[in-house]
Image: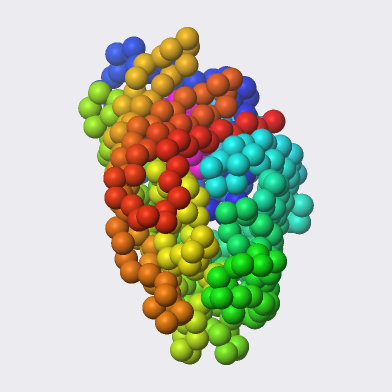
Amino acid sequence: MRHDPTRLSRTSLAATLLLGALTLPAAARVYDRVEVRGAEFVPQDDIRRACGALDGIALEAADLAGVERCLMSTGVFERVSVSGQGDALVIDVTEVEQRPGRIEAAISWVNDRSLTGSLSYEQYNLLPDTFAAVHGDFSRDAKSFDISLYRADAFRPGLHFGIDILGQRSNFSDLAFSMRSHQAEFYLAATPDEATRIEYGIGWRDHRLFGLDADASPLLQREQGQLDAPFLRLGFSHGDRAGGKTGGLFVQFEQFLWNLGTSSPISETRLELDARHVLAGGTVLMLGLDGGIVAGLSGNDTTALDRVFPGGDSFRGFAPRGIGPADGDDFLGGNRHLILSAEVQHELGKVMGTALRGGIFADLGSVWGLDDTLGGRIDDKAHIRSSIGLSLTFDVASTPVSLYAAVPVRHQPQDERQVFGLSVNARF
């Protein structure tokens, strides 16, 4: 989803269902799933979890009435109806017309950007029935902002409208160039069911490659410059990225047509798959795929602004932007990339009151393909890289911390390797 509405306050949800220890009469029913209807701004997962676990537990009429009272006590709903429909427990809500807003600041450390500060502002009903959000990230080497307006059911139920305005500027010390990009997009989003989302977007992008090092690759020298033009986007996603109690599959596909109406039209295709399966004893198996293709549509070459630069968290064991075709010390990105990952995580219990989860993982993939290899001077073949490692996740004072140590198994001589990775995100 493109918005992240304010979570229901847990302190306002003091009423919970105490069902587990009760001997229930024969009239009680067990529902396989919980379906939420009518929610526009309050996240559906928050509504499902607000009053305790509901699926897979025997519930009778008095319990359903208790859920209605519990949700009404939050003060964010005008009406709540809870009823059984087949194997589903349906929670139908009408939200109170209000203007809740939130300002949030964060400090994080991520491998791709190092120390990063973030500032976010969100407002509901800033315009009638419209969610608005402003977000900015600031680090030594990169700055970005995102302004979003989103109206659910703008034209009919299940057909939403949004506007995104994005901007970024980067000058990473490990690359021989700087880049700047601004874009604005209008999009429609259709949600035919709870798990499926289809987006159609049209917009304008202005991007620029500049500030090359004096000894930068001749290929980058040719690619520097500025281009602004319209673009089209098609997006599709299905499933829950976080997975349910037993896991699940999430798929996301995006197709971009950049630089329309120019002599340099570009097609960009992205595909992401995430699968989770919950095993016995607090163990989770996670599988992932991240791939994409970038290509010129009129015999034109792609540029470093179009190509992909994997590494860091996207390919553990290798430095951010540290693999793929290179000319000397200058990494150039690739037109194609495919990265597969497999990880088994297990709950390790608590240490000093902190829950720990450990994992073992393997990453495998490559980034390859250039339209211009400078007469064969640049090796752009699909050389397979791989790595194995250990991960550890825990919270420090409600701040999530993720660590990993990875060892490259297969690599190329010019690859930049990175054994340790750290991700910390503290919000205020």
Viewer-proximal residue among 342 and 312:
312
Q: Is residue 205 above or below residue 129?
A: below
Viewer-proximal residue among 156 and 298:
298
Asked whether residue 415 is in view, the answer is yes
Quick check: 3 left or right of 256?
Answer: right
Q: Is residue 180 magenta?
A: no
Type of secondary structure dominating the magenta stretch: helix
Q: Is residue 48 magenta?
A: yes
Q: Position of residue 154 (x, y in %)?
A: 62, 63
Taking the spot 22% from the left edge, 27% from the top edge, the residue there is: 280
Quick check: 415 left or right of 303?
Answer: left
Viewer-proximal residue among 152 and 232:
232
Asked whether residue 35 is in view, the answer is no
Residue that sits furthest to the left in the current view = 280
Viewer-proximal residue among 183 and 415:
415
Quick check: 100 left or right of 72?
Answer: right
Q: Is residue 261 above or below residue 393?
A: below
Taking the spot 38% from the left edge, 25% from the top edge, the residue there is: 357
Q: Which residues are magenta?
A: 44-53
Q: Is residue 324 above or below residue 293?
A: above
Q: Position of residue 21 (x, y in %)?
A: 34, 12
